[in-house]
Image (spheres, helix red, strand yellow):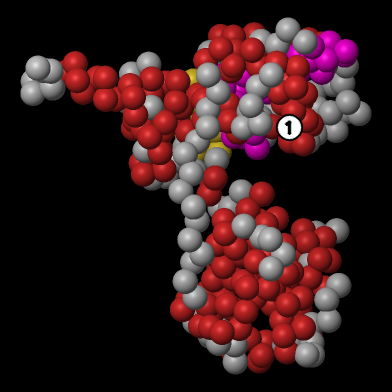
């Protein structure tokens, strides 16, 4: 079964015109084979389009076809977003839904199927500004070198290796779980070649403690690991689910008395913030994190504002206090 037949199930359960079904199926294949999107974004876009098609069926009162897409106006797209907001969907998710629809309609126009730019007239929902919430240095250390280990030693070693990759190398959880024995920092390799969001590639150095933790996990793992297969496995030998790492963090929050903001992704925030506090250059941190824009990385300067002000007071010739 190819990717299109599996991914289209979500949409094809809805009553759609045959031409629209084919167009949606083709777009889902396009996302898989032609776009440099992360798997999480592709899955989210599929859900967004499914929700839009379900709404459109109700909005029009009949199964829509391609011709109906031509007649949609900005009011229809705003009605969809309003419908989603009534279900307590947050602005960030609404903004992603709008992005998915814009991507879909741009593709329809490029493929000479439908031309309708009304979706471009809809303003992107405002996303509240948020500042990353890193752990303290001691808090991060307690997570990556935990005192309370899992009852199964190899699973404890596995979780520690994954969490070290998040805090010690600043990887996203999807990037850490995407490693294979051939790409992991083993056998003298101290740099990882990481393919991140949007297919953006970067080189990330690995601390010796990370390599040692991975080697320990491999030595204890009861399942065979293939060179190009997933490095981290679940209890039954399949690829490790990100949810299991999230659950491990939830347990650590309870055991160690950490705040609710202590999540796997918070370890990546902690990596960046602690490097900045130690004097690392912001552009170097940008490269390590794989951010396409420096503005994305600059949010960490707000977290570390006090340190920056202290450096300013010490260095600027006019900073002398009376």
Please indicate, yes or no, whether residue 279 appears anywhere in the rendered image. Answer: yes
Q: Which residues are magenta?
A: 149-175
Q: Residues within 10 Å of mark 1 (few under 14, many from 20)?
A: some
Residue at 56% x, 53% y is 36
Q: Is residue 113 left or right of residue 253?
A: left
Q: Position of residue 22 (x, y in %)?
A: 74, 78
Q: Which is nearer the eye, 207 or 180?
A: 207
Most extreme residue toward the right is 236
**Dividing the image into 4 quarters, which one contains the C terminus?**
top left
Q: Is residue 107 magenta?
A: no
**Dividing the image into 4 quarters, which one contains the N terminus?**
bottom right
Q: Position of residue 230 (x, y in %)?
A: 74, 31
Q: Is residue 263 left or right of residue 319?
A: right
Q: Is residue 169 magenta?
A: yes
Q: Is residue 40 above or below residue 2?
A: above
Please, what secondary structure does the residue beneath circle 1 have?
Answer: helix
């Amino acid at each position: 079964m190819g990717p299109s037949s599996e991914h289209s199930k979500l949409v094809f359960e809805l009553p759609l015109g045959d031409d629209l079904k084919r167009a949606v199926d083709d777009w889902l294949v396009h996302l898989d084979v032609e776009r440099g999107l992360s798997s999480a974004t592709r899955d989210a876009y599929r859900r967004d389009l499914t929700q839009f098609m379900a709404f459109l069926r109700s909005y029009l009162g009949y199964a829509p076809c391609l011709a109906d897409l031509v007649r949609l106006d900005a009011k229809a797209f705003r009605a969809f977003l309003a419908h989603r907001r009534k279900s307590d969907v947050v602005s960030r998710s609404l903004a992603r839904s709008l992005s998915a629809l814009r991507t879909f309609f741009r593709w329809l126009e490029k493929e000479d199927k439908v031309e309708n730019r009304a979706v471009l007239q809809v303003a992107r929902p405002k996303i509240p500004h948020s500042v990353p919430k890193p752990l303290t240095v001691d808090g991060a250390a307690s997570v990556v070198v935990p005192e309370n280990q899992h009852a199964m030693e190899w699973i404890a070693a596995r979780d520690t290796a994954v969490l070290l990759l998040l805090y010690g190398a600043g990887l996203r959880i999807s990037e850490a779980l995407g490693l294979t024995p051939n790409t992991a920092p083993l056998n003298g390799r101290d740099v990882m070649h990481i393919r991140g969001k949007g297919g953006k590639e970067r080189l990330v150095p690995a601390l010796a403690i990370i390599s040692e933790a991975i080697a320990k996990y491999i030595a204890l793992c009861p399942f065979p690991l293939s060179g190009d297969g997933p490095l981290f496995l679940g209890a039954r030998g399949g690829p490790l689910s990100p949810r299991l790492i999230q659950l491990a963090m939830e347990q650590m929050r309870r055991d160690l008395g950490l705040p609710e903001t202590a999540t796997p992704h918070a370890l990546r925030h902690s990596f960046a913030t602690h490097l900045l506090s130690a004097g690392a250059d912001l552009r170097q941190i940008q490269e390590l994190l794989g951010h396409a824009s420096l503005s994305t990385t600059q949010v960490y300067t707000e977290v570390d504002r006090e340190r920056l002000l202290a450096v300013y007071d010490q260095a600027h010739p006019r900073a002398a206090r009376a």
